[in-house]
Image (spheres, rainbow, N blue to C red):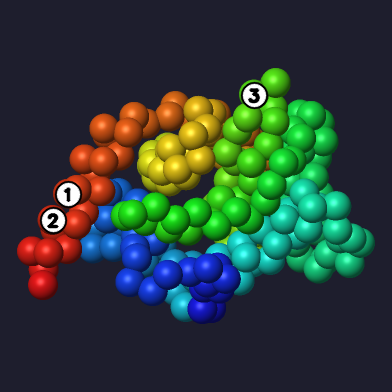
Amino acid sequence: MKTKLPNKYKEGLVRVSSIVEWAFPFKGTEDEKRFHLWLKDKGVSLFDYMEEASSGGTYVHKMMENFCNWKNINKVKKEYKEIVMNGILAIKSNHIEPIESEIYIRTRTYQWTIDLIAKWNWKKYIFDFKTYWLAKYKFGLDSWIYRKPYSKLKKARLQLSMYAHSKKISNIAIIELDKNWFYIHELELMTKDEINQIIKEYYLNYLDEL
């Protein structure tokens, strides 16, 4: 599924996700090889799996955006209803107060969109909704054992820290959704120096490849 670009998207300026994937690569690693072998063993097409992860994740994000903007979400697709309802429960039960959602940001070196800016525990936060397990549910690969996706939390920390510094916000967290429950992971903000070093190395690597 083709990624929908923000309305103010600037061609030629790198996306936050590109920097994050470069800093914490999956493609070409042993983890990717094991992942492909695992799908093959389960009889699941890589294309179908990634298509569901993309399209399903986009749909859930859109429903959460609608909820945070007080829009009607009565007609949620059946296959995603439990996940969306848990997203709503995460917001309501934790008294998270949405301020803005789907905010496009652009700096001199990167761009993309923030899922949610909200007040939580009297502080302003940047939140990101994650649906790590969504495709596994469709193909019957889910497990009742919940494990924190530590490698993915490292990626999320960099991603949200980049957003946070662009908006001068000091608190970041992800809301991980699955069909059984939700999990809020509050993350430590990376410093500007840490982020700038990663961005510098990213662009130097890019120039080396030209």
Q: Nearer the viewer, residue 35 or 14?
A: 14
Q: Nearer the viewer, residue 94 or 97?
A: 97
Residue found at the very far left of the displayed protein: 208
In this rendering, does residue 70 appear at all? Answer: yes
Other residues around mark 3 within 10 Å, as few (<14) / some (14–19) / many (≥20): few
Instruction: Label 3: state its secondary structure.
Output: strand
Q: Residue at x 48, y 58 (%)?
A: 112
Q: Nearer the viewer, residue 57 or 79?
A: 57
- The residue carrying mark 3 is 123
4 in relation to 155, above or below = below
Q: Nearer the viewer, residue 132 or 22?
A: 22
Amino acid carrying mark 2 in the image: Leu
- The residue carrying mark 1 is 201
Confirm or deny contact between disc 1 and disc 2 (CB under 8 A): yes
Quadrant in the picture for residue 195: top left
Amino acid carrying mark 3 in the image: Lys
Quadrant in the picture for residue 117: top right
Q: Compare marks 2 and 3 and give the one earlier in the sequence.
A: 3
Report, in whole angstroms, how far the alpha carbon at label 2 lies from the one at label 3. 36 Å
